[in-house]
Amino acid sequence: MALPRKFAARFVGLAITLFARFITAVRADWQGIEPINKQRVYFANHVSNADMPMIWSCMPPNIRRDVRPVAAADYWLKNKLRAFVGPEVFNCVLVDRRPEARDANHDPMQNILDALDDGSSLIIFPEGNRNMTDDPLLPFKSGLYNMGKARPDVDLVPTWIANVTEIMPKGEVIPLPLICTVTFGAPIHVGTDESKDDFLKRASGALVGLAPKDVRL
């Protein structure tokens, strides 16, 4: 990345962080881990376009520097602005959800594993799509399990984002001024003989267990 674009990306990243904190007073609640710079995969509930910026913004700068959200290439490369913010500001690991757009022999999981092998931490949304139902979570896709199996030393950290549905309802681009809390739980790993279905059920339970008990999910 050329120096002026790198400087612009850092400036926009700082502006997004300050904007998120000003509008939502987003705060981190480290219940199960310490905010230290350790390689992790943060897996979170997904109800809004604001989810990823909220997690990213509430992390300390020394952690945020090494964290890369996993995001849809077909969304973030849709226009020049998104193509700047996604890959250059957030340093997203892009995965194309459209099989017809990939090379025949390209496995989208390889981009994710390459990022882990480079030492990055990741933010992922294992539901795959935004949850617009009344259920607390949609069924998880298999990606989280595949990461845990392929890189068993990396901590998989449940990360619950509270109140973001009200902050940015679907279709809105300007968040409402409400308080958002991001809760980080205890890390989990795929058991030696644990099946995919059993692990994904356990991971889903660990995540929804962080949700506030006195509010609508």
Image (tube, rainbow, N blue to C red):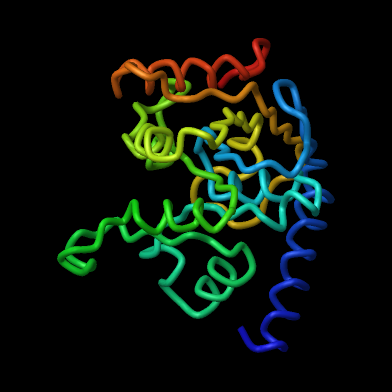
Q: What residue appears at the point 57 percent right and 33 percent down from the top-left corner?
A: 155
**What x and y, as percent, mark residue 128?**
38, 41
Where residue 168 sits: x, y (%)?
A: 61, 45
Residue farthest along the top direction in this orientation: 213
Question: Where is residue 201, by image quadrant?
Answer: top left
Q: Position of residue 198 (x, y in %)?
A: 33, 15
The residue lying toward the viewer, choosing from 3 and 204, is 3
Which residue is pictured at 69% across the width and 28% down the height? 183
Q: Residue at x 57, y 75 (%)?
A: 84
In front here: 214 or 46?
Answer: 46
Q: Which of the image's four quarters has the N terminus?
A: bottom right
Q: Quadrant of the C terminus?
A: top right
The answer to whether 137 is drawn above or below residue 107 in the figure is above
| Nearer to us in this view, 16 or 107 | 107
Q: Is residue 165 left or right of residue 192?
A: right
Residue 179 found in image quarter: top right
- Image location (x, y in percent) of residue 181: 73, 32
Tell me: residue 84, above or below residue 145. Answer: below
Name the residue at 65% across, 23% down. 185
Number of numbered discs overlaid on the protein picture: 0
The answer to which of 128 and 3 lies nearer the viewer is 3
